[in-house]
Image: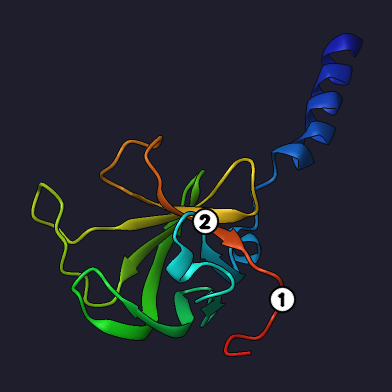
Amino acid sequence: MRLVLLACLAAFFALPALAETDFFGVLSGNFGQLYVVEGDCRTNPHRVTFTDGNSRALFEWAGPIIDYEEKSRVIGGYDVVGLNDLGIILNLDGESRLTAEGKPVTWVMRTVIGFDGYCWGRMDWPDARCESPQIRCPAVPLGS
């Protein structure tokens, strides 16, 4: 009985190691593309902020980008729809890309093992697939 109690206490005190990651804190800040010079930390970094009680994500680039619809923009917004073990689940404002089932794509902004940054997954992709890696930039104001 005493061994069972000790095992339960040991498991209880181990729980903080299993605590949920603060994805909103980890995935906020200034970032740049890892492998694309035109969007790296020196040429066109972007800032990620979470607002409205972490229900909205705002991406703001230092200069214009060309998005997936071939449109120029400097701001992108997402609704935060949840969290999973990998990161933050988001719906892009005005998303026009569709899954194989014909539904708008739902994105996962994921942390990346091995560097301080994130990459993009989709809810309809395998967990191992994550694209467009972004790395944290030095804390320099955008537009400087």
Depth check, front residue: 32 or 75: 32
Q: Quadrant of the C terminus?
A: bottom right
Query: Residue at label 2?
Result: 34
From the top left corner, tell me how far across and down residue 141 is, in percent: 66, 86
Query: Which amino acid, by three-letter code, is at mark 1?
Result: Ala
Q: Residues within 10 Å of mark 1 (few under 14, many from 20)?
A: few
From the top left corner, tell me how far across and down residue 4 is, in percent: 82, 13
**In the image, residue 4 above or below residue 52:** above
Q: Which corner quadrant of the image does residue 105 belong to? A: bottom left
Q: Which corner quadrant of the image does residue 49 belong to? A: bottom right
Q: Quadrant of the N terminus?
A: top right
Colouring scheme applied when the structure was drawn? rainbow
**In the image, residue 133 above or below residue 47:** above
Query: Which amino acid, by three-letter code, is at mark 2?
Result: Leu
Depth check, front residue: 53 or 34: 34
Residue sitting at x 46%, y 74%: 55
Residue sitting at x 64%, y 41%: 114
Looking at the image, do the residues carrying marks 1 and 2 touch, with CB atoms under 8 Å apart? Answer: no
Query: Left of 12 or right of it: where is 61?
Result: left
Tag 2 secondary structure:
loop
Please name which of the two marks, 1 or 2, marks the residue nearer to the observer.
2
As drawn, the label of residue 139 is 1
